[in-house]
Structure formats: C-alpha cells, structure tokens
Image (cartoon, rainbow, N blue to C red):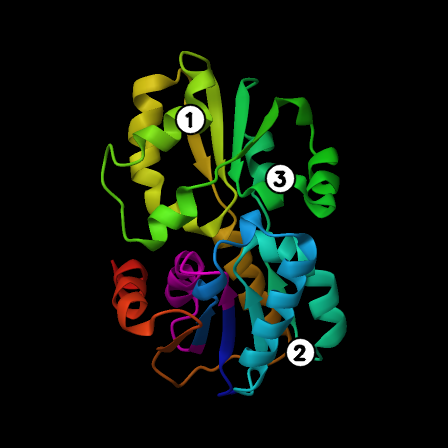
Amino acid sequence: MDKRPVGVFDSGLGGASVLREALRILPTEHYIYFGDNKNAPYGDKSEQEILELSLKSADFLLSFGIKVMLFACNTATGTAIKQVREKLSIPVISIEPAIKPACEAVGDGTILMLATKATTQMERYHKLKARMPQSCRIIDIPCPGFVERIEQGVFGIGEYDDLFDKHLGEFKGERVDAIVLGCTHYIFIKEVLAEYAQRNFLGECRFFDGNLGTVRQLARVLKSKDMLNNQQKPTVDFYTSGDEARLKPLFEKLLYS
C-alpha cells in the first residue's frame, strides 16, 4: 500500500471532470488537485508560456510528495508533457483528444473535434490525427470563450447558443456522426451541447472524451508499480492560483454533482 497522494493538474477547473472519473474507478486514493485558474485559459497562450506554466504547476504538486502526476489538461499535455516527463522521476499520466474511438465508431459522416486553439495547432495533436483512419472526416474547431464561461459557473441550456452559433453554425443541417470534447472543461457543458446538436445537426452526434481512458491508464500504472492505496477513504485537497473563495465551491459542485 502506498499512501502518497496522486497529483492532478489542470489549467483551471476542467480537470475536475477527470478527477470525478478517478474517484469512481480509484475510490481509495488521496488526490491533490491544482488548477492554475489565475492563468486560465491556456488555449490562447504561446507554447512557451504554456510550457513555463505547466512546469511551474508540476513543481508545486511535487512539493506534496506525490507518487504519480495526472495531467488533466489537453493543452498542457500537447505542449509540455515531454519536458515534464524528462524532468520528473515519478510516472506522469496524460490526456489527449479521443479522436481514435471517434474514428473507429460506425459511420462515415463528419467528426467535430472541439478544443482550445492551442490544442488544434500543436504538433503532437497533428501527429496523432495523421495516424487515424479516414482522418479527413475530422474537422478541428477552436472554441475560444467556452473555458471562460465554464469557469464563471455558467451551464444552462441556451446560455452557450451564441458561442455555438459562432463556432459550429456553419455545420447546421449537416450530418455529424461524432463530437470529440478535446478539452476537459467541455465535459461540463456536454448536455447543453447535446441539446444544441439535436436541434441543429443531422446524424447520431455521439460524444467522445479521453477521461475514462486516461483514468484506466492511471489505474494500470498504479497497479503495475504496486502503488495502490487500498485502505484509505478517498480525500481531495484543492489548490488554485486563483480566487480560492470563489473557485472551491464551484470545483466541489463540478466534482460531486
């Protein structure tokens, strides 16, 4: 049994969607979450800025003596994961857009990959995309504005229609087989997006995200390295570079709702 905590990092609150999955699959671990809300969103920053912020956040989590680090941010993964893994002596688990299961699903219609601008431009993502069967089906859609609104605690039906029309309006009436949520924040507006898709798109519009696969990999690594904590009730400690008084209640709402 290894009682050391699991460190979870995200640019803001989006990683709560990954941590929620981790609590379901690994319910006896101690988690320390850090959201760099002061500098969110990462999606409109340069790769050098994202790298520097990610390394600084990794150092913060290391100070707690964590046994493994979970990068719950697609943008940070695409930019900094190689350098973080080279620097750290502990395992680092990362997330990436779930375009593989989306491409493997039945259908030959469009696959909309929604992510931050930075993620859609990164070399790591484009190499992943190039390995996909029928990658021409994938349309990358940067979605500025989503993260900011989610971080403000906005989740209601219709409250994103202006942004959806701006970023997705050109696909109205078209067949969309799949929508990939390529940012962990977007999980929290999945129902809102599904309602919009039902009104405006043809096709099945199945949703895909990388959360479950990422947490399963975390479980495999902990088990293979004999790091599981099997006797402790789950605990979560929340840290942020932003306004903790405002953000912690929202984080807990997202995590446990």
> What whole-number distance in Å separates the C-alpha atoms at marks 1 and 2?
42 Å
Residue at 23 percent of width and 41 percent of height: 156
For marks 3 and 1, the one nearer the N-term is: 3
Numbered disc in front, either 3 or 2: 3
Neighbours of disc 1 within 10 Å: few (<14), some (14-19), many (20+) = few
> What whole-number distance in Å separates the C-alpha atoms at marks 3 and 1?
17 Å
Does the magenta segment cover residue 20?
A: yes
Query: Quick one: 122 or 149, which is closer to the camera?
Result: 149
Which label is found at residue 56?
none
Indicate left or right for 244 with 115 as reference.
left
Q: Amino acid at mark 2?
A: Ile
Does the magenta segment cover residue 1?
A: no
Name the image quarter holding the C terminus: bottom left
Residue 105, percent across and down?
54, 30
Indicate left or right for 26 with 141 as reference.
left
Q: Residue furthest top?
A: 173
Residue 175, percent across and down?
46, 15
Numbered disc in front, either 3 or 1: 1
Q: Which residue was labeled with disc 2?
A: 90
Q: Which residue was labeled with disc 3?
A: 120
Residue 106, percent across and down?
53, 24
Dividing the picture into quarters, in which one does residue 190 lie?
top left
Query: Quick one: 60 or 181, which is closer to the camera?
Result: 60
Residue 230, percent across and down?
44, 82
Q: Which residue was labeled with disc 1?
A: 166
Write down the region rendered in magenta: 9-31
